Image (cartoon, rainbow, N blue to C red):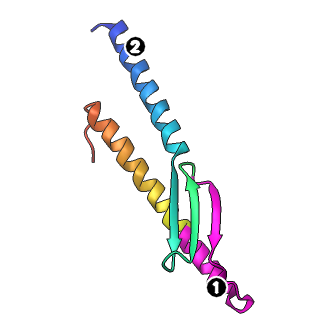
Amino acid sequence: MDINKLMQQAQAMQKQLEDANRQINEKEFEGSASNGLVKVVINGENRVLSVAVDPTILNPEDKEMIEDLLMIAINDAVDKAEEYKKERYGSMASALGIPGK
């Protein structure tokens, strides 16, 4: 077993993981609720970058509905980010010959 080759492979794998993490963290995901009346954009770290609410639903009497729509849109964006991460890391594992679940 060549220890130098093993170390090089480990360093290459670490660099690939760092690159993938950087790409994922920079990617943006948009979630929406109620046909786009509420939209939320997050990054790969699940940080909310923006929230957009259609002015037609901004009635103080609809406060609870707006809060629910925001929650739905945020969860939608987080779900999309998590799915992307799974796909990205899964394809990396396949490329490296690591068996999946």
Q: Earlier in the sequence, mark 1 or mark 2?
A: 2
Tell me the number on the disc at residue 57.
1
In the displayed structure, 96 sits above or below 87; it is: above
Q: Amino acid at mark 2?
A: Met
Q: Secondary structure at mark 2?
A: helix
At horizontal 58% and vertical 65% (from top left) the residue drawn is 40
Q: CA distance from mark 1 to mark 2?
A: 58 Å
Residue 5: image quadrant is: top left
Viewport quadrant of the N terminus? top left
**Which of 63 and 96 lies nearest the eye of the viewer?**
63
At horizontal 62% and vertical 54% (from top left) the residue drawn is 47
Question: In the image, which is nearer the foreground, mark 1 or mark 2?
Answer: 1
Q: Position of residue 8 (x, y in %)?
A: 38, 13
Tell me the number on the disc at residue 7.
2
Most common secondary structure along the magenta stretch:
helix
Q: Position of residue 89 (x, y in %)?
A: 38, 42
Which contiguous range is marked in magenta? 46-73
Q: Position of residue 76 (x, y in %)?
A: 49, 67
Q: Amino acid at mark 1?
A: Ile
Furthest residue toward bottom: 61
